[in-house]
Image (cartoon, helix red, strand yellow):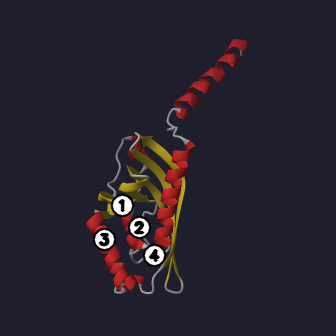
């Protein structure tokens, strides 16, 4: 191998690295922290059963979607063939309000006594920001303890779109995809 070939390899590696680095959206650290703190606060409202306050974080035109994942063979994925996702819910603000109202009645038997939940948000990345709207991608893990011995975990990815409203943010789109292929929980009455 010539000395020239050895010297050329790092340049190729750097080109690949630069191409990957171009996928990273760079935003001011203050904005990154502001979005993180907003989403952590949202998670804490759910864990504390502050559902009416949680609803305030969503815009009137919100689209709120949870889907299950599906499996496909490698050969199908290579051909671009993917099975359709299954919607668990596809809701707007009115439907979210109805879910909250039902939980508040004490008549949502699947949540009587209420489940204890922990909503964890991780690996938050900003995908785009135009000064008013920010799109994020993150992973979530929701731990649910219900009754005396029932424990369930819901893990997946989500994409959020947030709109600047005054000095804070409102979520106007949330698309979540569960990693689970089959739901083992008897119900999904909790809020994601």
- The answer to whether the residue labelled 2 contacts the one labelled 1, judged by CB atoms less than 8 Å apart, is yes
The answer for how far apart the CA atoms under marks 4 and 2 are is 9 Å
Residue 118 picture location, percent across and down = 53, 70
Residue 98 picture location, percent across and down = 29, 73
Residue on which the image places disc 4: 49
Q: Quadrant of the N terminus?
A: top right
Residue on which the image places disc 2: 54
Which residue lies at the image location 32% right of the left edge and 68% below the top edge? 96
- The answer to whether the residue labelled 4 contacts the one labelled 3, judged by CB atoms less than 8 Å apart, is no
Q: Is residue 9 left or right of residue 152?
A: right
Q: Secondary structure at mark 1?
A: strand
Residue on which the image places disc 3: 97
Question: Mark 3 packing: few (<14 Cα in 10 Å), some, or many (20+)?
Answer: some
Residue on which the image places disc 1: 58
Q: Quadrant of residue 104?
A: bottom left
Above or below, 68 relative to 75:
below
The answer for how far apart the CA atoms under marks 1 and 3 are is 11 Å
Above or below, 177 relative to 127:
below
Observer able to see residue 191: no
Between discs 2 and 3, the one toward the N terminus: 2
The answer for how far apart the CA atoms under marks 2 and 1 are is 8 Å
């Amino acid at each position: 191998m010539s000395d020239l070939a050895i010297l050329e390899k790092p340049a190729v590696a750097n080109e690949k690295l630069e191409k990957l680095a171009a996928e990273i959206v760079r935003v001011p650290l203050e904005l990154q922290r502001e979005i993180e703190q907003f989403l952590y606060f949202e998670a804490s409202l759910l864990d504390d059963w502050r559902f009416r306050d949680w609803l305030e974080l969503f815009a009137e035109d919100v689209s709120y979607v949870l889907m299950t994942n599906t499996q496909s063979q490698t050969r199908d994925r290579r051909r671009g063939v993917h099975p359709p996702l299954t919607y668990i819910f596809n809701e707007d603000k009115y439907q979210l309000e109805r879910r909250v109202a039902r939980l508040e009645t004490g008549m949502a038997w699947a949540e009587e006594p209420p489940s204890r939940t922990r909503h964890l948000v991780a690996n938050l990345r900003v995908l785009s920001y135009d000064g008013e709207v920010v799109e994020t991608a993150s992973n979530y893990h929701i731990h649910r303890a219900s009754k005396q011995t029932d424990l369930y975990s819901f893990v997946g990815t989500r994409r959020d779109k947030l709109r600047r409203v005054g000095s804070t943010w409102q979520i106007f789109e949330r698309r979540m995809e569960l990693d689970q292929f089959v739901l083992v929980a008897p119900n999904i009455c909790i809020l994601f």
